[in-house]
Amino acid sequence: MEFKSFEAKIGVTFKNQQLLETAFTHRSYLNENRRNGAEHNERLEFLGDAVLELVVTEFLYKKYPEKPEGELTALRAALVNTVSIADAATKLGMNEYLLLSRGEAKDTGRARGIILANAFEAVIGAIYLDQGYKPAYDFIDAQLFHKTDEVVEKKLWQDAKSKLQEIAQERLAVTPTYELVNQTGPDHDKIFVVAAYLGREKTALGEGRSKQEAEQDAAQKALVAKGW
């Protein structure tokens, strides 16, 4: 796989090309293409996730000196959730660089979104290791920070579970409940599926990399399903 076009797209030339290739290598790819010394991207994703959280935290702290900790936390969650960073990865064309098994290559929708989000974080980790903090900050700035004003203006940062509870209690006199329906994947990379109930009605299913994220996704989908 040739990554020079991707480097040109993000304005970063890697000293260690192997880091960039690793960032795009899904675990499944190595099961079908065993090569000495080749790694999948999960360790880079782990590092990139931490760098992403720090960078976005620093940005929001400086941009909104008047906002309290709780609101800043919610804003950060809206910027770095799976949907947001998978969208950023898609707009960068990262899909065409992914190294996947034949089976994973057929996945679309939410499953592909999670793979893209993981690769996006892995690329951040690779940039950080290869270039340092400032280039990693600049990459995140270019891909995510422009979303901030829309998130604030449309109140996309608001907690979907809290909003669903407030409206459900007001209109239906019920409190939403959540039930874990399924979990797949290894311990370090699980995908959780949660159902949101309004009374006895199963209103929506949500997915996420944690139970909390899956519940938020289910709550958001329930709001859409009910037209709230």
Image: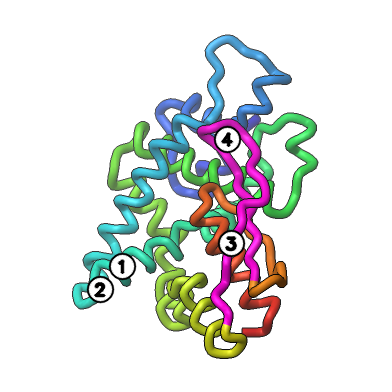
**Few, some or many residues within 10 Å of mark 3 (<14, 14–19, 20+):** many
Name the element at disc 1.
helix
Q: Report whether 137 appears left or right of 68.
A: right
Q: Residue at x 50, y 70 (%)?
A: 161
> Does 85 appear above or below 158?
above
Question: Total of numbered circles in the picture?
Answer: 4
Q: Are marks 2 and 3 in contact (CB under 8 Å)?
A: no
Residue most extreme to the left: 65
Question: Which of the 4 image quarters holds residue 133?
Answer: top left
Task: Tell me, yes or no, if residue 163 can be seen here.
Answer: yes
* Near-viewer residue (125 or 158): 158
- The residue that label 1 is drawn on is 72
User: The residue under label 1 is which amino acid type?
Assistant: Leu
Badge 1 or badge 4: first in the primary sequence: 4
Badge 4 or badge 3: first in the primary sequence: 4
The CA span between labels 3 and 1 is 26 Å
The CA span between labels 1 and 4 is 31 Å
* Near-viewer residue (202 or 104): 202
* Near-viewer residue (77 or 36): 77
- The residue that label 4 is drawn on is 24
User: The residue under label 4 is which amino acid type?
Assistant: Phe
Q: Are marks 4 and 3 in contact (CB under 8 Å)?
A: no
Name the element at disc 4.
loop
Q: Are marks 1 and 2 in contact (CB under 8 Å)?
A: yes
Badge 2 or badge 4: first in the primary sequence: 4
- Segment tinted magenta in the rendering: 174-197
Q: Residue at x 65, y 30 (%)?
A: 1
Q: Residue at x 53, y 32 (%)?
A: 187
Q: Residue at x 53, y 84 (%)?
A: 169
Question: Which of the 4 image quarters holds residue 26?
Answer: top right
Name the element at disc 3.
strand
